[in-house]
Amino acid sequence: MRRLIAGLDVHTSHDDVAGRHALLWHHGSPQTGAILPPVRAAADAHGLAVVSVARPGYAASTRVPGRTVADVAAGLVPVLDALGVASVVSVGASGGGPHALACAAVMPALVRAVVTFASPAPFSGDDAWFAGMRAPGGLRAAVEGEAARRRFAETDEFDPTQFVDADFAALEGEWASLGADAGAAEADGSDGLIDDDLAFVRPWGFELAEVAASVLLVQGESDRVIPPAHARLLEAALPHARLELSPDDGHVSVLRRLGAALSR
């Protein structure tokens, strides 16, 4: 089911999720927030409803210029209150990772666990943060501000060398819906992606030490988009984190481990 709540484009796997334990899905950058079939399948297998919300600037969600990562999490509080879910496992892929962590800091009573896949770490302010990224142009431009990031968007093209063979295999197989959804998000415009990049390289609005929930960090060691060093930084800064490295996985193929991660 799809509806607008508090200016956000909200998708749920069932018409009524009140009283249910839910997988709160934080989509990557860019995505529309639609519930992807493998996400629903993994949630169904673990008895969880799915709640997925398009971040401001994506799909029908109202843009919030200057938003921080914590702002997005705070914006989800009235959504989850309206839906009446009992608890959530906050799960974020790539650009959704920081937002999954923020929810645990902003609403600790509701978030019982966090799982991230290939999440960036907070910006360190130095060039080492970009090491291992095959195509960091958008994030580098974001450091210079919104105007620079928008100029970059005018000529930005996808660099296929960011993905390893396992990524392309996943996109041709069970995660084909992710590629199609990314295309749909790009067709809607670049505001959501630009605002995500800007949020990642400015203070997130919360400290990782505030995340009291258990966190599973799932990371492909072959990832050329968000390299493993970011997962190690997160593990060191989070009070209750465990890092699970997958040697042969890249940025997309690591999502194949979603079902297993929910069993941890």
Image: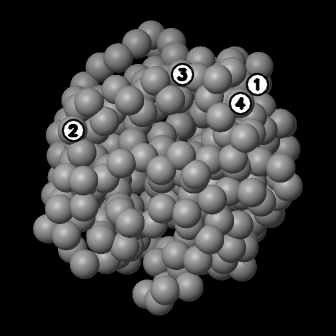
Q: Residue at x 21, y 74 (%)?
A: 145
Q: Residues within 10 Å of mark 4 (few under 14, many from 20)?
A: some
Which amino acid, mark 2?
A: Gly
Q: Quadrant of the C terminus?
A: top right
x, y (%) of residue 240?
A: 74, 68
Q: Which numbered marker is on residue 200?
A: none
x, y (%) of residue 224?
A: 63, 59
x, y (%) of residue 111?
A: 59, 48
Element at label 1? loop
Earlier in the chain: of badge 1 and badge 3, it is: 1
Q: CA distance from mark 4 to mark 3?
A: 13 Å
Pointer 1 residue: 46
Horizontal side of 79 relative to 23 (left or right) equals left
Pointer 2 residue: 189
Q: How many marks?
A: 4
Which amino acid, mark 1?
A: His
Q: Residue at x 75, y 34 (%)?
A: 256
Q: Which numbered marker is on residue 169?
A: 4
x, y (%) of residue 20?
A: 59, 24
Q: CA distance from mark 2 to mark 1?
A: 35 Å
Horizontal side of 183 relative to 239 (left or right) equals left
Q: Is residue 75 visible in this depiction of the protein?
A: no
